[in-house]
Image: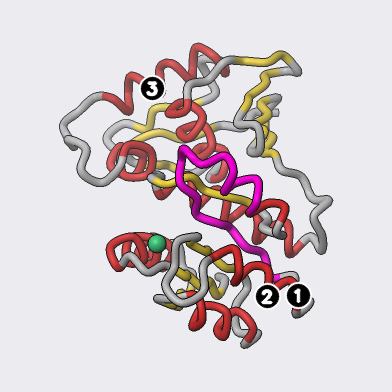
Amino acid sequence: MARILIVEDEARIAAFVSKGLRAEGHHTTIAVDGKQGLDEALSGGHDLVVLDIGLPRIDGFEVLARLRDQGSRLPVIVLTARDSVTDTVSALEGGADDYMPKPFRFAELLARVRLRLRTTEAGGRQAEDALEAGGIRLDLRTRRAAVAGRVVDLSAREFTLAEIFMLNPGQVLSREQLLDHVWGFDFDPGSNVVDVYVGYLRRKFGAKSIQTVRGMGYRFNPGP
Ligand code: CA
């Protein structure tokens, strides 16, 4: 459980992020402009910040700059526009720990939040930016996968699905959970897209990597 500050002026996005993080057991606070966000971030009551760039009063870059000027090392994940490489580069140079291009699926943000929280717990930025189990390695920065040291091509959806499985080893994940996380909440629940993509992953990771649990869903088996 972590205390997460969401600085986002778009109520719909703030609510979407907040709801998802709470469902994961985190405590969330929403700040609706840069000034409020900066004050909250400096209050010392948060473990991580999800920071939008386009904000009223003070924009996200300025919030980040002032936060770092004050010596805060609070992990910050910046929400950037997907087509703006400049924003992304500026954010990282300005001291952001990670970025999330908008629009995004919740699972993608959650993976980054988990990674940042783990990195913080490990006491520094040196901690791994990868998930590894059973010979499968997912590089969360480059979004590339390898099996037994050999690079395997995964589509963005396949990668996100693999990430969810690897973040929850040995746990049964239902089709609905996987649909929500990887394809979004409004996807047709009757669709067999999850089964199809699990099939793709099995082909790439090995037939036994993901087990079918009848009537319940799927379980990732990390293996030896
Ligand atoms: Ca905004």
Name the mark nearer the viewer: 1 or 3: 1
Q: Answer with the quarter of the image where residue 91 lies.
A: bottom right
Q: Secondary structure at mark 3?
A: helix
- Name the residue carrying label 1: 69
Q: Is residue 44 above or below residue 150?
A: below
Comparing 209 with 34, the one in front is 34
Q: Position of residue 1 (x, y in %)?
A: 55, 70
Dot 3 amino acid type: Tyr
Ligand 1 falls in which quarter? bottom left
Q: Secondary structure at mark 1?
A: helix
Q: Is residue 174 left or right of residue 93?
A: left
Indicate which disc, 1 or 3, sits on the residue closer to the N terminus: 1
- Name the residue carrying label 2: 66
Comparing 180 with 116, the one in front is 116
The answer to whether the beta carbon of the residue marked 1 is less than 8 Å from any atom of ligand 1 is no
Q: Position of residue 3 (x, y in %)?
A: 55, 75
Q: Position of residue 199 (x, y in %)?
A: 40, 17
Crowd tier of the residue under label 3, counting other residues whose Cα lies within 10 Å: few below 14, some 14–19, many 20 or above = some
Dot 1 amino acid type: Asp
* 3D distance between C-alphas at marks 1 and 3: 45 Å
| Residue 197: mark | 3
Q: Position of residue 195 (x, y in %)?
A: 32, 23
Q: Is residue 68 above or below residue 135?
A: below
Q: Is there a contact, CB below 8 Å, between mark 1 and mark 2? A: yes
Crowd tier of the residue under label 1, counting other residues whose Cα lies within 10 Å: few below 14, some 14–19, many 20 or above = few
Q: Which residues are magenta?
A: 74-90
Indicate which disc, 3 or 2, sits on the residue closer to the N terminus: 2
Q: Answer with the quarter of the image where residue 193 lies.
A: top left
The answer to whether the beta carbon of the residue marked 3 is less than 8 Å from any atom of ligand 1 is no
Q: Is residue 136 above or below residue 153?
A: below
* 3D distance between C-alphas at marks 3 and 2: 44 Å
